[in-house]
Amino acid sequence: MIIIKSDKEIEKMRAAGLLVADCHEMLAKHVKPGITTLELDRIAEEYIRKAGAYPTFLNYQGFPASICSSINGQVVHGIPDGTRLEEGDIISVDLGATLDGFVGDAARTHAVGQISDEAQKLIDVTRQSFFEGIDKARVGNRLSDISHGVQEYAERFGFSVVRDYVGHGIGRQMHEDPPVPNFGRPGRGPRLVRGMCLAVEPMINAGGWDVEVLPNDWTVVTTDGSLSAHYENTIVITGEGAPEILTLRGE
């Protein structure tokens, strides 16, 4: 069941979303060669808790950390550990915060020092594919119009869209209905209505779209070893054209 949020609930989601946005901006300053993913996790958790919220990911279905940190060919759900970032890596950081009963969820992919042109292009295209998708996130359109917008843009550059993992509705729970694929034909799925809150999160691979899960039962990697990037924001469908991005300041 898709839960439509009231104006009062959206205001609470806006507060949670801005906390997530600020946490990402803060973490970006720490993404440098030599730092460990576990250090990034501890920095994020401390920031979220100091704001009076709690890290939504921690212990969610058994996940052991406050952020997902996925390096290079890791797609999503990388577990922070003692791995040190190296010059030329890319890392996606996915995090959520629950504040006053509502969840904000967003992901960013960062360059670690100087990276290859291909890696930078992948990051840029993945980010822009999100915006191409949400350009269709307007009252009266269908959910798959967002999906098609993401896929069409990413594939234009020769990249592939992960099929096995998708975005989702969001609110009091991190994962609510409806699922939000990043691929598919337009004109399908539920109508978009005012107050619908979605986490739209393109996961784009430089190679093929096939993925597999490592033996830790969490970390998802590209089957062919190619690079992968991830970009996500929580949005709300408005009655005034374009959606509001709740996890990005100034948009």
Image (tube, helix red, strand yellow):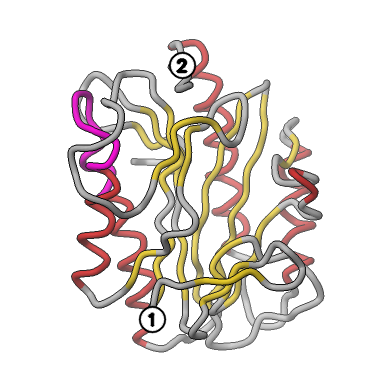
Indicate the quadrant where residue 242 lies: top left
Residue assigned mark 2: 5
Relative to 64, 165 lies left or right: left
Relative to 185, 218 lies left or right: right
Residue 143 colored magenta? yes
Q: Position of residue 71 (x, y in %)?
A: 60, 75
Q: Identify the residue at horizontal 52%, vertical 32% (top origin).
A: 170
Q: Identify the residue at horizontal 45%, vertical 68% (top origin).
A: 229
Tell me where the magenta segment starts and ends, as one range.
Answer: 133-145
10 Å neighbourhood of mark 1: few (<14), some, or many (≥20)?
Answer: some
Q: Position of residue 112 (x, y in %)?
A: 55, 79
Relative to 187, 194 lies left or right: right
Residue 106 colored magenta? no
Q: Amino acid at mark 1?
A: Gly
Q: Amino acid at mark 2?
A: Lys
Q: Which mark is residue 103?
A: none
Residue assigned mark 1: 207
Question: Disc 1 and disc 2: Cα gap in Å?
Answer: 38 Å
Closer to the eye: label 1 or 2: 1
Q: Is residue 241 above or below residue 43?
A: above
Q: Position of residue 2 (x, y in %)?
A: 45, 22
Q: Quadrant of the C terminus?
A: top left
Predominant SS along the magenta part = loop
Closer to us: 98 or 112: 98
10 Å neighbourhood of mark 2: few (<14), some, or many (≥20)?
Answer: some
Closer to us: 228 or 234: 228
Q: Is residue 78 above or below residue 137?
A: below
Q: Identify the residue at horizontal 48%, vertical 19% (top origin).
A: 3
Element assignment for label 1: loop
Indicate the quadrant where residue 75 lies: bottom right
Q: Identify the residue at horizontal 27%, vertical 59% (top origin).
A: 151
Element assignment for label 2: loop
